[in-house]
Amino acid sequence: MTVIATTQPRAALTEEARAELTALLGDRFTTSLPVREHHGKDESYHTPCPPDGVAFANSTEEVSAIVKICAKHKLPVIPFGTGTSLEGGIAALAGGITIDLSGMQQILRVSPEDLDVTVQAGVTRKQLNEHLRDTGLFFPIDPGANASLGGMTATRASGTNAVRYGTMRENVLGLTVVLADGRVIKTGGRARKSAAGYDLTRLFVGSEGTLGIITEVTLKLYGIPEAISSAVCAFQSIKGAVDTVIQTIQVGVPVARIELLDEVQIDAVNKYSKLDYAVAPTLFFEFHGTEAGVKEQAEMVAAIAQEHGGMEFAWATRPEDRSKLWQARHDAYYAALALRPGSKGWPTDVCVPISRLADCILETKQDLAESNMLAPMVGHVGDGNFHLVYVLDPENPAELAEAQRLADKMVTRALEMGGTCTGEHGIGYGKMAFLEQETGEAFNVMGDLKRAFDPNNLLNPGKVVRV
């Protein structure tokens, strides 16, 4: 749990800079220690690293003004949404000012005919879907946490619906971004296709605040399906569950969600969410479409599951039952921690080509069986992505070392199989070494881009690439 130092020294918040930020924001700029500590810690195991001050912005214009002050005084700037990142992405490794965007909660425009919406960066996914409730539309990207849409864009989030609807990369049409010198640019637009110039939108999606601060996002929307049905299926073996996923994808069933919970995780979910599923490797499914289409999808998947040792489907068709099912899935992290009161979680993820998913999961499970670590497994396995959370005592060096060994081995295995070091958690500073291993010379090109956009290395320094 050691913070990785950046190459630049920690900046000092001068009285002049403090005065300028206070003049701009009044009591929306603070150096209160509890507020700073809150903004220096995400949901991960990484050591908290608070900023020197926190600025609460309400508009793109205010973000621009804050960034200009910070640029003038050579203060690093770290954007903050809801603090649900998992690789230390909001830690103020070189000090500086955190810009909290959570107050930017305006839904600026909804165009039902065009199936798109523009929101400020602080709008959360649940807030947007609540606003859309009476329009017959919804925004499907669901990482579990009620994250801000700006943060989801910055980390290229995905989640349980990605197998059908894609990730943030596929669903962001355009952005408003504040650059390192305070300039405001707009990228992309509302057209569904364009051949106009460099695709700056995709460049900022997933940049984790290192190239610019996203303040507004234009997103695709989708019609709420006529029929939605969820099901739970337990399996005799984890191989049978994973093989069911692979065959389902390969035959082209347009399933909306396929989530894997291993026997350790399903036991935790049962205890935490007061459910009574069989303690066995389990798949959670969801099917979207017409009544006839959902019925056909379900029958096809049920037949595939039966071939691979699947038990009877337990159905959830009423909205309240589906909500309970998926809330239990989203609470899996907290359920895992509840298996060992007082513990902390070390979450990690990888993603591999679907054809290598069974190999990667089975070899990882074998490593866990040979270790003494408690590490429940969950996965958005429909797109080859799975997660472990090592449940450990952060004060126990032996446990930390074992978790690091196993996590490193899992990532190395995924890379050898043609996969990636992270399917959705992002790089932050926790996986920088693996990003370099994965991308080779392209890692240096990313550094060149960082220097071009941010020559003074003030935007979330110490994350994603080394400068």
Image: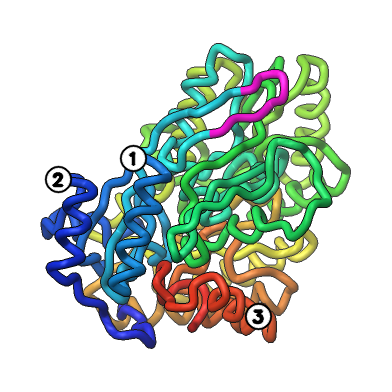
| Cβ atoms under marks 2 and 3 closer than 8 Å | no
Residue holding disc 3 = 445
Gap in angstroms between the C-alphas marked 2 and 1 = 13 Å
- Amino acid under label 1? Asn
Q: What residue is shown at x 41% (from left), y 64% (from top)?
A: 89
Q: Is residue 365 visible?
A: yes
**Residue to which mark 2 is pinned:** 27
Quarter occupied by residue 365: bottom right
- Residue 58's label in the rendered image is 1
Label 3 residue SS: helix
Is 238 drawn above or below residue 150 in the view shown? below
Q: Residues within 10 Å of mark 1 (few under 14, many from 20)?
A: many
Point 43% across, 46% down: residue: 332
Q: Position of residue 196 (x, y in %)?
A: 80, 52
Magenta segment, which residues?
111-118
116 in magenta? yes
Q: Residue at x 71, y 15 (%)?
A: 226
Q: Is residue 122 magenta?
A: no
Give the residue type at disc 2: Asp
**Left or right position of 108 against 42:** right
Give the Cα separation between the discs numbered 2 and 3. 41 Å
